[in-house]
Amino acid sequence: MAQWVSVASAAAPAGLAAFLSLRTVNRGSARRFRAAFIDLAIAGALFALVWGGVGMLLGASGVPGLALEVDFAWVLGVALAGMFLLLRDDLPLQASSSRSPGKAHQHIRLQRRDGSPMNPLTSVLRNLTLLALPLLWLDWAAPLAAAVLLVEVVLIWRDRSGRRLGDRLAGTRILFRRHHAPTPDGF
């Protein structure tokens, strides 16, 4: 049976010297970054499917006045990708909750600090800071968005507990599967 451990129990000793060194304090950070990349790729694919597929079908129909619908397809694609990113940790289609597709691939599970199960509100609170991603393209908001994302990355990479701003906001923690042997519960 697989054993789940928190980041703090898998992390190297912390301190000012360890924080200032180039070595990663949190050993699970690479798995978290790979999981985030997978989830961002899925969100990008959802956006491309809606904007490219639906938008091009509407635009190629030859009916005058469908430019508005093509813009609507872009907005719909952004909304769908954003909803996926916000709700990815508690999707109803998953065989197991508390894991996005990227986290499932990287054998990572979320747990609320109080032990209660994940729910959509917790997922939205946890991923709220990801709304800074689209703000990077706005001139007036780019510095703030970049600062929020930088703090997120630094906390994942360097914080002993491995809790990013979203984890602190939602009261969640990350668990890693210690070995990857199949288990009866599918994890």
Image (tube, rainbow, N blue to C red):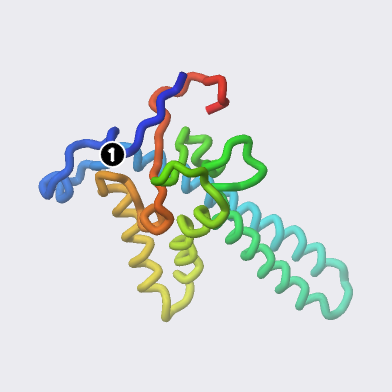
Q: Residue furthest left?
A: 17
Frontmost residue, 130 versus 72 = 130
- Against 142, residue 155 (above or below) is above
Residue 172 visible in the current orientation? yes
- Measured as percent of width and height from the top left, residue 183 is found at 52, 20
Horizontally, is 140 left or right of 62 in the view?
A: left
Residue 34 visible in the current orientation? no
Horizontally, is 44 left or right of 70 in the view?
A: left
Q: How many marks?
A: 1
Please, what is the three-letter code of the amino acid marked with disc 1? Answer: Ala
Frontmost residue, 48 versus 124 = 124
Horizontally, is 47 left or right of 119 in the view?
A: right
- Measured as percent of width and height from the top left, residue 97 is found at 57, 40
Task: Give the structural element (helix, strand or loop) at label 1.
Answer: helix
Residue at horizontal 30 percent and vertical 53 percent from the top? 155
- Measured as percent of width and height from the top left, residue 82 is found at 58, 61
Residue at horizontal 41 percent and vertical 23 percent from the top? 179
- Against 78, residue 13 (above or below) is above
Frontmost residue, 5 versus 141 = 5
**Residue designated by label 1:** 8
- Measured as percent of width and height from the top left, residue 160 is found at 25, 44
Give neighbour class at mark 1: few <14, some 14-19, many 20+ (Cα, 10 Å).
many
Residue at horizontal 34 percent and vertical 54 percent from the top? 153
In which quadrant of the rendered view does residue 79 lie? bottom right
In which quadrant of the rendered view does residue 95 lie? top right
Residue at horizontal 42 percent and vertical 76 percent from the top? 141
